[in-house]
Amino acid sequence: MNEQLGAALAAEEAAIYAYGVIGVHLNSSGDIAEARAAEQAHRRKRDYLVGRLSQLKASAAPSPAGYELPFPVTDRATALKLAIQVEDGVAQAWRPVLPATEGADRGTALAHLTEAAVRATRWRRLAEVSPATMAWPGRPE
Amino acid sequence: MVLTGAVLQSCDMGHSRRWVLGTAAGVGAAALTGCGLFDSDDPEPPKAPDPLEPVLAEALALAAAYDQAVVTQPGLRTRLAPLAEDHRTHAAELSRLIGEPMPSAPAPSASAAAAATTVAALRQAEQAAQRTAVAACKVAPADRAGLLGSIAACRATHAEALR
């Protein structure tokens, strides 16, 4: 379980970083509110994971000082594209936690997978990407 | 040993047949298994339903409900058709895991989803179906947890897409 939680932590930290970049390129209050809420949610997941890994006496790899973005983020369109990619990635990091856990830990992991998938759908709708859903959120494509 | 006693008792009626069986296959074997093997035409005990069955039933019911909604409201096709397709993808995978061919139509009582044709009703049906998948995921063996988790998450995204 520790390995999967560590991977989820890395994804949540990357998401927090990404939303810092995304926020700069959004202008409408709707977009900005969405990005702020998402960033706060990812911070809560990060804190949960740090606490859980500490309870399990597992050490997580330190987060990198910086991240290389998958493509240049220069405007709203590329910012929304990154937000979609970030949420898909977070969902993909939480899914492997499910088979590695039971009970309350699995329930929490499923809630986090679901939240990321729902946010990805919200970003797709804002970006007018169709379809806004996929059959297997969290399954690597 | 209670079982063995009962078997012997019920077989005792056919005394001569037991003798025949005894000479053919050995008395011990006949006493233990004779009734079940040769006398009983009881159907096999029903297999316990696979815990994936309710998740499959809702996938099929939701796919059918979307199809019906598109018939009555063709303007919603672009929005609803991909959601129906997601459910059919789930149903195919669930049927494969259960090991039975996919039923061509959902059982009429499968779910309230069958009657849902307005966007609001479809959204409620997705939320109910999400709860079914969440419950199934929580108690599933490890090798099914990811599949059921993705199905639960997908149903949540459908409810979001219908807002």
Image (spheres, rainbow, N blue to C red):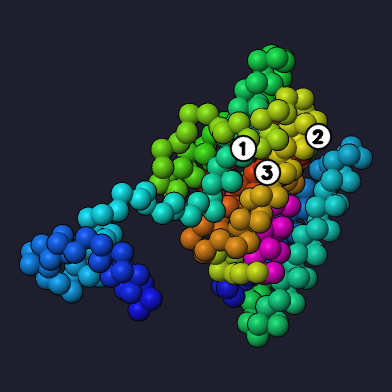
Q: Earlier in the sequence, mark 3 or mark 1?
A: 1
Q: Nearer the viewer, residue B32 or B126?
A: B32
Q: Nearer the viewer, residue A141 or B111?
A: B111
Q: Quadrant of residue A7?
A: bottom right
Nearer the camera: disc 2 or disc 1: 1
The reply to whether label 2 and label 1 mark residues of one chain is: yes
Q: Quadrant of residue B122?
A: top right
Label 2–label 1 contact, CB within 8 A: no
Name the side, left or right, on which B48 lies relative to B8.
Answer: right
Residue corresponding to mark 3: B129
Q: Residues within 10 Å of mark 1 (few under 14, many from 20)?
A: some
Instruction: Look at the numbered disc 1 and give the secondary structure of its residue.
Output: loop
Circle number at residue B110: 1
Magenta stretch, overall SS: helix
Q: Amino acid at mark 3?
A: Ala
Chain that bears disc 2: B
The residue depicted at 65 percent of the width and 15 percent of the height is B71
Q: Position of residue A37 (x, y in %)?
A: 85, 52
Residue corresponding to mark 2: B163
Calculate the distance from the C-alpha at mark 3 to the C-alpha at mark 1: 11 Å
Circle number at residue A27: none
